[in-house]
Amino acid sequence: MIRVAIIVGSTRPGRKARDVANWTYEIARQRNDAQFEIVDVADFNLPLLDEPVPPSMGQYGNQHTKVWAAKIASFDAFVFVTPEYNHGTSGALKNAIDYLYAEWNNKAAGFVSYGSAGGARAVEHLRLVMGELMVADVRAQVMLSLFTDFENFATFKPAQHHEKSVTAMLDQVISWGTALRNVRK
């Protein structure tokens, strides 16, 4: 059985990403074809990238990088929960991704995004990054609107139909994540 990280991609005070990740996790944990864990970028206290050697060299000098690398290496696939800030993903998520290289390679990823345009542009941004890291990103994605899925733009209340989108995205992530385990061997 593969392990899938649901990555909370915002560290901003008042963020909605943790609520969205918890909702995604509650849907995911009803499955029996993968193990899921919420991984909150905020819990790792990563400063702006401070490793002197490029991540592709795999020579991590800082303890916070080694802890982050061990966590990410333990997964076969990822679901990135991302807000959209200024037509892109959050700086905190991009920074956390940039810390590592091999730990991401030959794994699968899906996306749950939110924003005024459903977070679509944040996911477009992340898809480019995933390609460079040799992460197979799946087509199905979940896009949540600040206008219709958040009461008063604050309280997360997703429309019921989004659960089907989560299921479709997870189906693809688990399928691809399972297949890519053989590539990593």
Image (cartoon, helix red, strand yellow):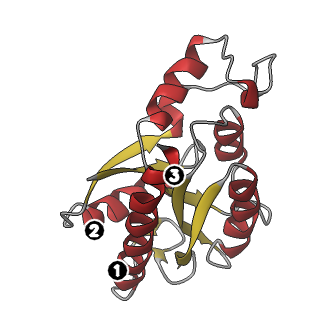
Say if residue 20 shows up in the picture.
no
* Residue type marked 2: Ile
Name the side, left or right, on which 138 lies relative to 100: left
Q: Which mark is residue 46?
A: none
The answer to which image quadrant residue 139 occupies is: bottom right
Name the side, left or right, on which 100 lies relative to 87: left
Categorize mark 3 by other alpha carbons within 10 Å: few (<14), some (14-19), many (20+): few
Residue at 34%, 80% (x, y): give it: 163
**SS for callout 1:** helix
**SS for callout 2:** helix
Q: Does the CB distance between marks 1 and 2 fall below 8 Å?
A: yes
Say if residue 70 shows up in the picture.
yes
Tell me the residue that label 1 is attached to.
163
* Residue type marked 1: Glu
Tell me the residue that label 3 is attached to.
183
Residue 117 in percent (x, y) is at 68, 79
Residue 150 in percent (x, y) is at 48, 73
Q: Does the CB distance between marks 1 and 3 fall below 8 Å?
A: no
Q: Does the CB distance between marks 2 and 3 fall below 8 Å?
A: no
